[in-house]
Amino acid sequence: MKQRIVVLGASGFIGRRVIAALAASDWAMPVAAMHRSQAALPPGVERISINATVESELAQALKGATGVVNCVTGSYETIVAGARTLFDIASHTPATLRVIHMSSMAVYGSATGDIDETAPLRGDLGPYSAAKIETEKFAARGGNIVLLRPGIVYGPESPLWCELIGRLLMARRIGDLGLAGDGICNLVHVDDVAKAALLALQAPGIEGQAFNLGMPQAPTWNDYFQRYAKALGAVPVRRIGHTRLMLELKALGPALKVAAIAAHPVGLSPPVPIRPWLLDLCRHAIRLRVSKAENVLGMKWIPLDDGLREVAAWFRAKIAA
Amino acid sequence: MIVDAHDFPNGQMLTADVCIVGAGAAGIAMALELIETGIDVIVLESGGLKDDRKTQSLYAGTVADERLHSPIDRYRQRRYGGSTTIWGGRCMPFDPIDFEARDYVPHSGWPLGIDALMPFYPKANRICEAGEFAYNIGAAFKLSTHPMIEGFESTHFTSDTLERFSCPTDFGARYGHKLRAAANVRMVLHANVTGLRLNASGSAVESVSVATLAGKNFSVRAGHVVLATGGLEVVRLLLASRDVKPKGIGNDHDVVGRYYMCHIAGTIGTLQFDRPLGSVWHGYDVSDEGIYCRRRLALTADAQRRLGIGNFIARLHHPRITDPAHRTGILSLLYLAKLFIPYEYGKRLHGEEKADLRTWLQHLRNVITDPFYTVAFLWHWLRDRTLPERKFPSVIIRSRANRYSLDFHAEQEPNPESRVTLSNECDVLGMPKLHVDWRYTAGDMETVKRALSLLADDIRQSGIGRFDYDPAAVEIEMTRYGAYGGHHIGTARMGNDPRSSVVDTDCRVHGVENLYVASAAVFPTSSQANPTLTIVAIALRLATHLRARHEQATPGHAAALAGVAAENIA
């Protein structure tokens, strides 16, 4: 008999892939929990509409389930409230309910160098990283909980790392950033994240543990931009120098923000500004060590060039549409 | 981290696993390669973060013939980043034939082949920011590109090899953030090495003596010492350290400073093509990674062997700028703007020829009568050269007459009489200054003469035009600006025999167990290639060697590193 697995945040970028992976398995019966979304689902997948921050609604949804995958994202409040509710239930429910919580490499904050799961947590990179730390604190209260800490989750439909970056590459607004792009881009394909979630649902004896998710030979951001640009045909890749980046941040950024506000009522969408946090990330020299996910969960990773081919095809189709 | 020797107490003794002397292309490449290895590294750099006249003057010395060699404080920079701060950025690897012992090139032959460098070239290329290690047109450009010269058929020359261009990358500025963040690397600025102190038997360096221009002195004691200075300064450091070895370190057989090579280069003749304008492409192609690449005419290895001459390449070039007969406004403007062009670039651009008033007026007329192309060129220069970080590499002038001159760059053969020695004068730190006696040989002239003659024949036989030049003027043209500036090669050559070489295949000075040289000084031959890429490759190879030695010496550490390596490979 198939196991009932509830996916919270099932309409999101990662949630959709987790649903698809569960639906394709021979052991899971996925249930897509969404708040207001009417996103399409694979055939035969059960849909429930709940507010995951309301304990009674969530408890009802989890009845009969052997696992739950929490892919809820959003504002600090949304992330924290949802996780608090889920982990409260988890701490009171029998150990047969395995909770997989999508945390993030953001919990390591501004740490640099090689980082494994034992590294101290620092929520010093803004509200998102603070929210993820807060949720991990709830997880420490007990329950059959496994934490996944993916790096930069890319793949078709990734709004940030594939769509936004793709548009910026096509417009030659990013490319080879020189020393500003020397940070490590800890990429992990969204299907690998989904696969890790499924493996973590089934693996015995990993309660309370955390797993970094990312490709072992992670490229620098410059390498990622170069390789993605090549896959998109956005060549030759342009060197974007320090002065140009500063102009983007200090002059073009504010102008585009104003333009976006002005253009909104008439339905126009000017180019998006490059945000300072993106450039901070491109400099960040943090390398996720992922041997634990490989050794304990048995993870193997989709090669970057394979992933980028798939992403480029999706991007071209999206632009054409 | 980057620290300043001015902040050290006088008389301090620093210790490290590896002490690298010089923070230029080789020193910084090595330091980068040793980050996060657990090896404690000190880099001693004479200069500071910016150019400083007083420090630069420590490079001053004398030359035997000022017409044949630039002043030796030119074309090299004594500062953090070294000569990469003024580098032109041209990258290309050596050719396999460069490593061979060739009976027609005296003293040729490396004790290793190109295979020993191939594992390091791709990374060297990345550090130089020259993109992929693809130096053949087919490998670099998946889609076909226009031929260099349509209809040119030759079994002696190929136009399929490339030179690729760095930004050009100032290594200090580009990689400073990594060096600052590295816990195991101490970059010490304003630290002038004044001597290598050997143990009593002369078998190892015990310490490195360092002084600042402000009068402080300190020492570094390190397991391994690497001289990562240029090919001239290596000689100075080895020969000036003579307290244990009276003839200087590594100089038992009087080899240090000999075999000094630059390159033989010049611009000659007129290439007139009979084909349509579009049939000749002498400019740059841009690879997918945004790298400027340029084809050139390279003499094949077979042709070199058949003719018994050295390596040789040539590029199509604009007419000589100094002669206003070219009637090209932008070339005349470059001539008139000579005062604003740095010495290192200007020398070969406009020479040091004195012009009379009539010549000046003719150049001015060229500028005035060719305004549209001049303005278009200036716009291109501003957009593609002045403003971007990745700079358009050189002046390319489209010839409306399909007429060019030929710019050649040839191997110089090793010659023990071409040498760098210590002079009797000392600098303010008490270091003997250098005296450079650069010489070329009949063999060097033969390489250029025979290659030019062969090229002229091949162009004529291809039926695409003609190459006219005065064979009697070859020597004048190849020495018009003297030895090619900035390429200081061969002064501490690599070899298996201490009687004819200074370092072994690991770049270790013969007879001194912990002293190494990472520099063009170790190249036994000069190739046609500019040296920087190979300097970086050699430096990376040496860093790998030192890492392996360190791991052998510290088994526990080695096991830990092996674990990391295995994990990374998995």
Image (cartoon, rainbow, N blue to C red):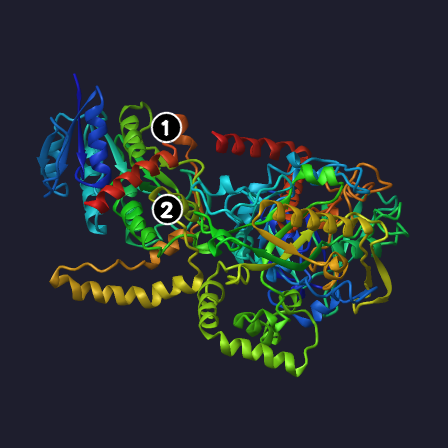
What is the residue that sits farthest to the right in this orientation? B246
Image position of A216 with respect to B47: above or below: above
Q: Say which label, 2 or 1, has the lower sequence index.
A: 2
Percent x, y of residue A195: 29, 29
Disc 1 sits on a residue from what chain?
Answer: A
Q: In this view of the protein, which residue sits in the foreground, B142 or B35?
A: B142
Q: Quadrant of the N terminus of chain B?
A: bottom right
What is the residue that sits farthest to the bottom in this orientation? B357
Disc 2 sits on a residue from what chain?
Answer: A
Asked if residue B341 shows in the view, the reply is: yes
Query: Which label belongs to residue B387?
Result: none
Instruction: Assess disc 1: are there few (<14), some (14-19) or many (≥20) residues with their C-alpha within 10 Å of its C-alpha.
Output: some
Instruction: Assess disc 2: are there few (<14), some (14-19) or many (≥20) residues with their C-alpha within 10 Å of its C-alpha.
Output: many
Left of B446 or right of it: where is B17?
A: left
Percent x, y of residue A301: 37, 31
Q: In this view of the protein, which residue sits in the foreground, B146 or A312?
A: B146
Distance in Å between CA atoms under marks 2 and 1: 28 Å
Percent x, y of residue B390: 49, 58
Helix, strand or loop under label 2: helix
Q: Residue at x 56, y 71 (%)?
A: B327
Asked if residue B221 shows in the view, the reply is: no
Q: Disc 2, disc 1: CB below 8 Å?
A: no
Image position of B289 with respect to B339: above or below: above
Kindly identify which residue carries mark 2: A229
Q: Amino acid at mark 2?
A: Ala
Left of A134 or right of it: where is A184?
A: right
What is the residue that sits farthest to the top in this orientation? A1
Q: In this view of the protein, which residue sits in the foreground, B145 or B49?
A: B145
Q: Amino acid at mark 1?
A: Met
Kindly identify which residue carries mark 1: A299
Image position of A141 with respect to B65: above or below: above
